[in-house]
Structure formats: C-alpha cells, structure tokens
Amino acid sequence: MPGDALAGAAAAGVRPNRRTLLAVGCSLCLYEAGMTLNDWADRDEDALDRPHRPLPSGRITPRAALTASVALTAAGLGLAARAGRPALVVATALAATVWSYDLHLKHTPAGPAAMAAARGLDLVLGATATGPLPSALPLPSAALSSAALLAVHTWGVTAVSRHETRGGASRAPSLALAATLAVAAVAARPRPSLRRPPSPAPGRPVASRLGATAGRLLTAAVAAGYARTPAAPYLHAALHPSPPLVQRSVGAGIRALIPLQATLATRAGAPGTGLALLALAPLARALARKVSPT
C-alpha cells in the first residue's frame, strides 16, 4: 500500500513529505479495514470454501471483525483529515468504495470496477495529500493517468480472483494478461512532458540527454519486470483454469503491484522512489510464502 501514495506523489510532481506519510497510514488503515470487512461479509461462504480462515474457524468472532473494520476506517479518515481537506475528500470516497465493494458490489458484475476504482483512488490520495495546501485539486493529468493504469491492473486481478475457489474460467485470466501487457506498454512510455525536456544549460547538453535516455531505459526495464511478474501465471491459468493455478495467478497479480508502482514513479521522473519501491519486491515474495496475499 505505501507504493500507491509514493507513486501518487511522484505523479503529482511533488517530493514525499509528512503528508505523504499520513496518506500511507490512511491507506494501510483502509486496506486492513477492507480486508477485515471482506472476511466478515464472506464468513458464511468461507465456512464452506475456506474453513481455515479466522472467522469460520472461530479464532475471531464476527462482532470483533466488524468492530475492527469500523475502528480502522475511522482511524484512516482521521489520518487523512490531518493531511488536509482535499485528502479527506478523497479518503472518504475511497472508504465508501471499500465498504460498498465488500458489502454488495463484489457479488455483482460491477465488482472488479469497484475494486479498480478503490486502487486508483488510493494513488490519487497520495497525490492529493502530498500536493500544496490548502487545495491540491485539480490534480495534474499525470496523476490521473497513473491512477488509471493502476486501476486497469487491479481490474484484471479482481476479475481473475472471482474464480479462484472453483476455477473453470479461462476468459478472465486471458483478459487480465492482455490488460497487463497493455498497462506495461503504456507505462513504459515517458510522460508527454518528459519526452522533450527543456533545453539544458549551456555546456551540459550531453549530460542532459544521457540522463533523459537513462530515465527512459530504466522506465522500460521496470515496466518489463512488472509485466513479467503475472504474465506466465495468467497464461497458465488461461490454459488450465484449475483452482490452484488461478489462485497462483491472483497472487502474482497482487505482487505485480509493487513493480507497477515503481514503474509509475520512474515514469513520473522519480527514479529514486521507483528503485526504493522495487527493493520491497523480495520482501513481498518472502511474506507471500508465509501469508497468502489473498
């Protein structure tokens, strides 16, 4: 989740600051609120398909889970309020989307779109919170573009996840694979404002051109790494849509969020942020072996 806020700050053209940390805290709270609420809403279904989970196994009571969801949502909105009114507006929309998805929309055809909107709003939250006060609106087009790319990727992962317990559907992983390749192709291209950098100072044209070229190559390389992460699992799930392969592809799609966030940050002209995010990928893989990302 921190990568959303950092990618949003980069897309807004602002260095991370204290308000970025508040956006990160808000994102973490709302994400965990959504995860807990999801288990609360699915407790009857999980009793049949995933009896080992905390609620159906009896380790956590439904009342405790719902209370935690409410408390985490309130905490997230409180952190957003400290980042400024624009951030609170975006966080409120994000919280409403999360609760709507968990309580109703995930069981409708609008489910993947709702989850995609939530992830896009999370990046917008980072851009809005980091931006200048008292108002960070309207957002620059680069922030909206990055949010849209993140949303498309999330839509693909969510569409596949709807079949992870029963399998048998090759269309969803095929579409997710196509969406991944399309997002990687667009994200690998530099932003329009970065394609023709301003004329360098006298005596430094070569260094400037080399820097711009290095930035483009780094963005393309990170985008390729993003596409590579879920591509093979999606392909395997499309060819053989068994529950284990579909679940594996969902996990790969979730892990691919980190290189995608890194790509978006690098594309926005913040290679340091992008490389720092990439450094989290090995940790994510290690944690995924201990706790399922789904």
Image: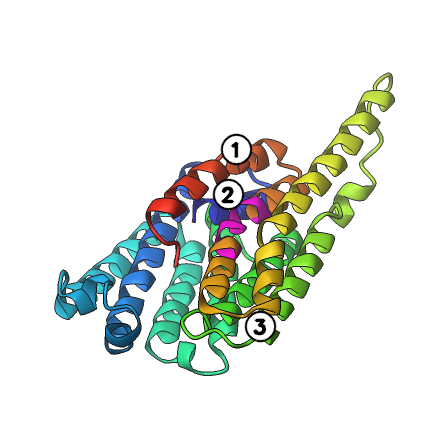
> Which residue is label 1 attached to?
276
Q: Nearer the viewer, mark 1 or mark 3?
A: 3
Q: Measured from the top left, where is residue 168 in percent x and y?
A: 51, 77
Residue 86 is inside the magenta segment = no
Disc 2 versus disc 3: distance between alpha carbons? 30 Å
Q: Nearer the viewer, residue 114 or 231?
A: 231
Q: Measured from the top left, where is residue 256 in percent x and y?
A: 54, 50
Q: Nearer the viewer, mark 1 or mark 2?
A: 1
Q: Earlier in the sequence, mark 1 or mark 2?
A: 2
Q: Earlier in the sequence, mark 1 or mark 3?
A: 3
| Badge 3: residue crowd in 10 Å (few <14, some 14–19, many ≥20) | many
Query: Residue 190 is drawn in which quadrant?
Result: top right
Relative placement, left or right, of 9 versus 204 is left
- The kind of residue on which mark 1 rests is Ala
Q: Nearer the viewer, mark 2 or mark 3?
A: 3
The correct choice, above or below, for 294 with respect to 286 in the image is: below
> Which residue is label 3 attached to?
172
